[in-house]
Amino acid sequence: MKRSKWLILMALTLVLSMFLAACGGSKNEEKPAADGDDKDKDAATEEKKHAKDEDGEPDAEQVLYLAESAAIPSVDSSIVEDQVGFNVLNNINEGLYRLNQENIAEPAMAAEEAEVSEDGLTYTFKLRDAMWADETPVTANDFVYAWQRAIDPATGSPYGPFMMSGVVKNATAISEEKMEVSELGVKAIDEKTFEVTLERPVPYFLSLMSFGTFYPLKEEFVASKADAFATNSDNLLSNGPFVLTKWDGTGDSWTYVKNEHYWDAENVKLNEIHVNVVKDSATAIKLYQDGKLDRAGVSGDLAMQYRDDEEAVLQSETSVFYFKFNQERDGKETPLANENIRKAIAKSFEKEDMVDVVLANGSLAANFLVPTNFAFDENEKDFRELSGNYLEYNVEEAQDHWKKGLEELGVESLSLEILGGDTELSKKMDEYFKSQLESNLEGLKISLKEVPFSVRLDLDGNQDYDIQVSGWGPDFQDPISFLDLFVTDGTNNLMSYSNPEYDKLIEDSKGDLALKPQERYEAFAKAEKILLDEDAAIAPIYQRGLIFLHKPYFKGLVDHPFGADYSYKWAYISGK
Amino acid sequence: MVKYIGKRIVYMFITLFLIATASFFLMQTLPGSPIASYNKLNDTQKAIVEKKYGIDKPKPVQYAIYMKNLAKGDLGTSFVFKGKSVNDLLATRLKPSLILGAQAMVFGTIVGILLGMLAALKHNTFWDYGSTFFAILGISIPSFVFASLLQYWIASEWHLLPVGLWNDGWKSSVLPSLALAMGPLALSARFIRTEMIEVLNSDYIMLAKAKGANGFEIAFKHAFRNALIPLITVLGPLAAGLVTGSLVVEQIFAIPGIGEQFVSSIMTNDHATIMGTTLLFSAFLIAVIFIVDILYGVIDPRIRVSGGKG
C-alpha cells in the first residue's frame, strides 16, 4: 500500500498545482474598479462620439446586450452598497429626482421642483401620479417607510447612515441607537406630499434625491415578502423605466424589460436589455466583436491596444487617485510629517507620461483633488475654473524641498514604503513611481508593498503605511464629497493630517456659508489650496478614465458622474 | 467490508469536522472586514452593523453557532450576496461547473487512455512518440492557454461555437470542457503508457501469450486492468478539482460557475461563502478518495480490503 499513499500525495500535489497555476494565470482581475477605493460610485462624463447623438430613427427591434463586471449582490435599496447594485436600482426604480441626460437632477417621482423653506431646512415634495408596477400609486408614505428603513439600525444598512448622517434630522442619533426611528425628519403630509426636515442646510440635497438609498419602497409589499424581499426578480417591485426579470439572486445573468406602468414609459424605447456578467475584459471584447455584446469595457493592458479602435469611446470618470502621506505610524512621527519631504515627493514624478504610457486608458493627470467636469457653481462654471492647479511636476523645486527636508530631519537618506493594489496595472504604476522618485530624489529608497483591496483598507484603518496609492469616487455632486475626507477627525483621514484652518473652512461651508453658494465655493477653493499647495497633505496623481468599445447603433446611453453608472431610460437601437 | 465502509464514513466526517474547524479559525486571520462600505461609517455605526451580522461576538461563540448550523446542513448567509443563503448560492453555481467538469473528465480519460494504450502497444514507433508529445504538451501547458486558443480559433475566427456565456445549451459547454479535458487527457495517456509497457513486459503476459490469448484480450483483459490502478489514484482527486470548477477557464468563457466564487469570496472576506466552498471541495475530495479505495478492490482483488489481516 505504500505506493498508493505516494500516489495520493502526488495526486494532491497535482491538484494543488493546478489551482496554483490557475491563480498565477489570472491576469484578468484587472477591472479598473479594483485599484480604486470605491466600489460605490464613480462614473462619468462622456466625451464619446455616438452615445449622445440623437440622430437616427429607432429600429423596430429594441433589444440591447450588455456585460456587467460583477454579479448583483443586492437590489434592496436600503442594503445596496456596490456599483452594480446601484446601477440596477437606477434603472428599475426611481427617486424623487433623477439625473437627466445633462446629468442635472430633475423632478422624477416629484411632480415639480421641491419647495424649500427660507432657512434651507425644510423641503416639501409634491409627488406625481406615478404607479408601482403592480398598478398601485406611489405615495408619500412609501418614501417615509424607505428612509426610515434605511436608517433603522435593525436593517444594518451601510449607506443609510452614510448618506443621511448630519443631513436628515436626527439621522445620526437614530443610526447610533440613541433615538427612535420614528423621530427621523420625514413626514407624509398627505398621500402625495412628502416633507423632509434637515439637520442643517445642505446645498446639494436635491442631487441626493437621485441616489438609490433615497428611493421609495412600498411597505405592504416589503412586509409581505419579509426575508425574501429583493432576493430575486420575483420579489421586487419596480417604479422605474424597467422591470428586472430572470434574476435568481446569485446568478450571472438578468434581463430588464420595459415597465409599461412607468409614468414616462412613452420615452423609454428599449424593450429588453440582456445582461451577462463577464469578468474578463478580453472575453468581453471577443463577445463584442462576435456581435454578442453592444458595449464592452476595455481594461488593463488591453487599453493601449484598443484606444485607437474606431468604435472605442473614452469615458472620463470622477474618481481621483492620490498619494496619502501618513504622518504618524505606530504612534511615532514618520519622515512624512515633514512638509518639505511631502512636497518633494509630490512634485517629483511626471504625471503626464504616467497616464499616457502606463495607464493608457484616457485617464487625466491630476494636479487637484476635486475632479474636473464634476461640480459646478451657480453659473454652471466648473469648480476647477475657480480653483487652481497645485503640486505640478517640477524636479528642481522637488529637489530643493528634498534638501531642506533632509536637513530639517538631520538625515542624509530615507527609506519609505509605497502601499498599493495588487492588480497588474497597480503594480506597473507603483514601479513607475519607484523609479521616478528614486532617480529624482537622491538618497530616497522606495520599497513597494502590493496587497489586495481588503488588506489595503485594513492597513489604511490601522495607519500602517508610509505612502499609499488611494482613490475616491464621489457619492454626490459637491466638492465636499472629496474635501470632507481630510478634516482632522474625518473617518478617511487616517494619516494624522490636521490643519485648523482647513477644518474651519469645511465647517463653515456646512454652517454659515451653506446658503451662500458663491462664497461656499470660494471657501472650497481655498481649502483645496491649503490641502495641496500649502500642506501637500496628499499628492494628486490622476483622474480615472475608461475605454469602452461601443457599437455605433447603440445610441442615447447616459452615464452619470456619481450615484449609478448609467441610465438606459433614453437609450435605443438605431441602424443595427 | 460493511464494517470497513462504516469505519471509513466515520473517519470522513471527522476529517470534514477538522477541516471546518481549521478553516473557520484560519479565515478569521484574514485582514479586512466583510462589510464593503466600512470606511464610510463612524465607530458606533460600525459596531451596530457588526452586531447585525453577528460578527461582534467572540470567535468561539461564532464558531459554536456556525458548527451548530452546519450540523443542520445550513451553511449560513453570504455577506456579499446580501441575505442569500450560501446553500442556494453553491447550488446554482455548482451546476455549470459540474457539467463542465464531468464532461471534461469523461472525454479526457477516455481519449487519454486510448492514446496511452496506442503508445504502449506501438512502443517506440511514430504513434508512441506522437502520443507522448501530445501528453507532454497537455501536462505542461496550462488549461487557460488551451482555453484562449480554442476560443480564438474555433469561436472567434471560425464561428463554429459560441465565444462564451452560458446561454446556448450544450454548445456553450463544448469549448470550456475541451480546455479542461487536456489535463486528465494528458495525465491518463502518460500513466497508461508507462504502466502498460511495464505490465506488457511481465511474466504473466508472456504466459498469456504462450497460452495463445490474442492481442486484444491481452491488451484489455490483462495489461489494461493492471495499468488502471495508479491512474485511478491520480484521477480521483483530479476529478474532485474539476467538478468544483476552474477559476480561469470559467472566467475566460464567462461561465457562471463556482470556481470563481472560491477566490472572490476570500478577496471579499465573505466568511460564510469561504466556508461553504472550502467544505464543498473537501467533501468532494474525501468522497472521491473513498470511492477510489473501494475501486482498488474491484479492479485488483489483491488489494481487497476486507480479505484477511494485513
Image (cartoon, helix red, strand yellow):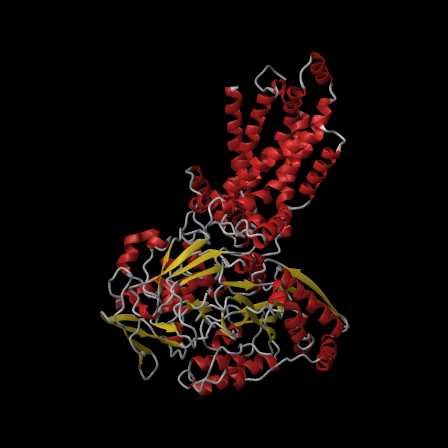
Tell me if A189 is positioned left or right of B180 in this view: left
Q: What residue occupies the far top of the structure in this picture?
A: B211
Query: Can residue A9 be seen in the rendering of this structure?
Result: no
Tell me if A70 is positioned left or right of A147 in this view: right
Residue B246 on image: x %, y %: 57, 46
Is B126 placed above or below A97 here?
Answer: above
Give the residue displayed 67% in from the left and 15% down from the top: B213
Query: Can residue A103 be seen in the rendering of this structure?
Result: yes
Give the residue displayed 63% in from the left and 43% down from the top: A18
Is B277 placed above or below A297 here?
Answer: above
Near-viewer residue (B127 or B65): B127
Q: What residue occupies the far left of the structure in this picture?
A: A190
Residue B33 on image: x %, y %: 51, 56
Locate the N terminus of chain A by quadrant: top right
Residue A401 on image: x %, y %: 71, 80
Near-viewer residue (A89 or A537): A89
State the count of labels: 0
Residue B103 on image: x %, y %: 54, 39
Is B297 placed above or below A217 here?
Answer: above
